[in-house]
Structure formats: structure tokens, C-alpha cells
Amino acid sequence: MDNKIKEQESIPVSKVQRAAKFIKTGAKVGGNYVKHYAQKVVNPSLTKENLHNNNANDIYTSLSELKGSALKVAQMMSMDKNLLPRAYQDKFTMAQYSAPPLSFPLVVKTFQKHFGKSPDQIFKTFTKSAVNAASIGQVHQATLGDKKLAVKIQYPGVANSVSSDLKLVRPFALRLLNMNEKELDHYMEEVEEKLLEETDYILEVARSKEISKACSHIKDLNFPGYYEDLSSDRIITMDWLEGQHIKEWMETNPSQEARNRIGQALWDFYHHQVHNLKQVHADPHPGNFIIQNDQTLGIIDFGCVKVIPEDFYQGYFSLIKRDLLINEEELNQIFYGLEFISDKDTEVEREYFKSVFKEMISLLGKPFHVDTFDFADNSYFQQIFALGDRISNEKMFRKSRQARGSRHGLYINRTYFGIYNLLNQLGAEVNTTKPEWLESGVKI
């Protein structure tokens, strides 16, 4: 970790303190807009680039001091590259790796509260500074006997402020995401449920062990062991996995064969979870993966897991078939079931939303339509971004009286586009294995 990053001595914990921080940031953002429009009077050709840079900087600085749900939302938005101007993407991506860490006295306080001891009384060695700090917690390196361990500590107050933080971040999200209010509220409900789960470290350890065991047969994957006696609802102790994040690893100029190997492991990991386990690691950002020296892929964080309901799975994945040989009546049933259309829609709205979602899912399904897919193909990603841009600017979406799509689709879409983005960073070509029912063309 870069020790020049200033450590935080405290976090605003009460609702009043956190609300005050949001209000102050809102005022700064408002001031940036006033300044921008004043300058535009003098210089009509002025673009919004400076405005976006200033806003991204002010919002990120504020959220990184608050930590928790608001910072997590920023991190999620940076993954959905077609949602935000580049200034926000670049700044919010930092939430995946390098939020300002907490100072050691606050770490000791958390240990005293949960174990009645300081980390130095539990471990043989324990780094005073965090080696990694993200949105919900930070990681320290420790040793015990001959084991090297990673100890993840949740920031104080994060679990109790999820709901109130999401209400406070709502105005920023509305402005930045260009969504209508109903759609955003629908989105935030699912986000809140997942974030509350993500602050429950006992649940995370249980899921980590369960999914690691269920995926242990997959080639070129590695998982840390977890230590329940050294974990609590706010602290997780696991094996330390040596290696590099994707960006660092790519800087070593690995061979195409090595990139394909890591990419295949990533694809196989997600394939097994989605189609066999029906629950999936739904936070595929680069900070959650380590590429080890033996060219295996280490999975180091199971905080966000999406359980896929059977009826949603059947409707959603039946749409990714290459030749959508489903009669109109059946297709309408699927679209109603997935909440893409509803009885409140006019005929024009129904036809419009059906065609848009068919296009969207057909694009998502492209890698499934061939035996191997080259994720280094940037033109494919340009199509995805262009579709996202087009939809976000179309009146039908913005004026829609209801949210579009089942809330279960939010994390599934995010998961797939997240995996595709990682595979694109790797420049990997992978064998896109399919579930048996898709290979055979039978109905599920």
C-alpha cells in the first residue's frame, strides 16, 4: 500500500454527521454547476469536462471519508461504464482499491469490541497500516504460526448506516445516472438488500466456504481457507493469497495462452455458479481477483452473492438462445414475468420495450452464440455502450411510469457485464460453455 495515503482518525457515524457531510458535498456540486454556467456565458463552446472532473473529485472525496454504502454505490457505478461520464468512472474506480484507510487505534478498538483483545494479542504479527482499503472494509496482513493471513475489518458504523446513506446518495445518483425516480427506487431496494448482506461477515464466511467447496473442482481456480474462530460479524480472517490484480498482471505482458487460461477459469467459475448452483459471486470488480504466480485465479471476496430464483432463471436465460424460436404468446409471458412490460403499458409502449429488451439480451447473449468468443474485440463493447447511451437518452425510458425489469436482473446484468469487462481487460479468448438445455436447444 502507498503509505502516502492519509489515514483517517475517525468516521462520521451518526445520521446527523453523515447527513451534514452529504449536504456540504451537495452544496459544492451546486457551486460547481453555478461556476460552469457562469463561465459558459463568457465562453459558449465550453464543454462539461471540467464540471465533471470537479464534481467527481468532490463527490469521491466526500464518499471516501464516509465509506460504506455510498462509496460502494460509486464503485458499482464505475463498473457500469456506459452509465457515467469518464471523469466519474476514473475517480470512482478508486473505490475498488484505494479508499483512505482507517488509523490503527480504530482497528484496535474494533478488535477489543469483538474479541476483547487487540490484534497484537491474537496474531504473531499484524501490520499497523492497511494493505488494501475499499468501500466497506480494509485488509491487514497478519501471521499466526507458519500461516500468512489476510484480516478484513469492517469500518465502524457501516452496517447501521446502509438505509440512511442510500437515501442521502439518491439525489446524486438521480443526477449522475439520468434515471427516472421509479427506476432508481427499484434499483436501490435491491442494492440495499445486498449491502445489508455484505455487512454481515458471518454470512460472508459461510457463503465463502460453501461456494469455494462447490467450485473446488474447477481448473486453475484457488480459494483461501477461512478461520471462523478468528472471525466475527465485523472481522474476517482468511489465508493470504500471493499474487497480482489483473491490471498489475497485465503490465507484466503475459502471453496470450496465459491470458486465455485465466479467462477460461473466470468463465468456468461463473458458468458453474449461475447454471448449476443458482447463486453467484455478484461483485466481479478487479479488486476481488488475484492472479497467482502459478497462473491460477484466486477469488478473495464473497461479500456480494446473488441467489437466482428458478422462475427468473428460466425466463431470463431462455431469451439468450441464438434463434429465439418462441411464439409471441410465450414471449409475452416471459416479458411479463421479467417485468419488462406490464398491464399498465399502452400497445406502443409494449412493442417498444419488447424490442429494446430483445436487443439488449441478444447483445448480452452474443458470447453464448458461438463456441469461442474473443473478448479482446472492442467493437463488441462499443455496441454495448452505444445501446446503453441510446436507451438512457430515449424519452420512452425516461418518462416511463414504472421501473423496467425484475429487480433480480439488476445484479445478474451487472455480473455478466462485469465478467465481460474483466475478460476484455485480459484480452482473453474463451470457450463459452453453455448449460445443457441451451446446447441441446430444449426448453428449460
Image (cartoon, helix red, strand yellow):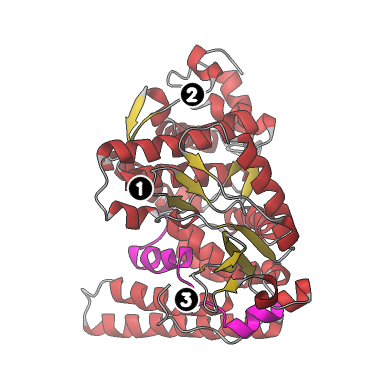
Q: Is residue 87 magenta?
A: yes
Which of the 4 quarters of the picture holds residue 68? bottom right
Front in this rendered view, residue 246 or 373:
246
Residue at (34%, 26%) from the top-left corner? 372
Q: Residues within 10 Å of mark 1 (few under 14, many from 20)?
A: some
Query: Looking at the figure, which quarter contains the N terminus?
Result: bottom left
Segment tinted magenta in the rendering: 82-110
Q: Label 2 near label 3: C-beta < 8 Å? A: no
* Residue indicated by mark 1: 385
| Coordinates of residue 215 in the picture (x, y in percent) | 58, 36
* Residue indicated by mark 3: 59
Residue at (58%, 77%) from the top-left corner? 66
Query: Which of the marked residues, 1 or 2, is nearer the chain's N terminus?
Result: 1
Q: Is residue 346 left or right of residue 228?
A: left
Identify the secondary structure beneath mark 2: loop
87 above or below 373? Answer: below
* Residue indicated by mark 2: 434
Q: Amino acid at mark 1?
A: Phe
Q: Is residue 312 left or right of residue 3?
A: right
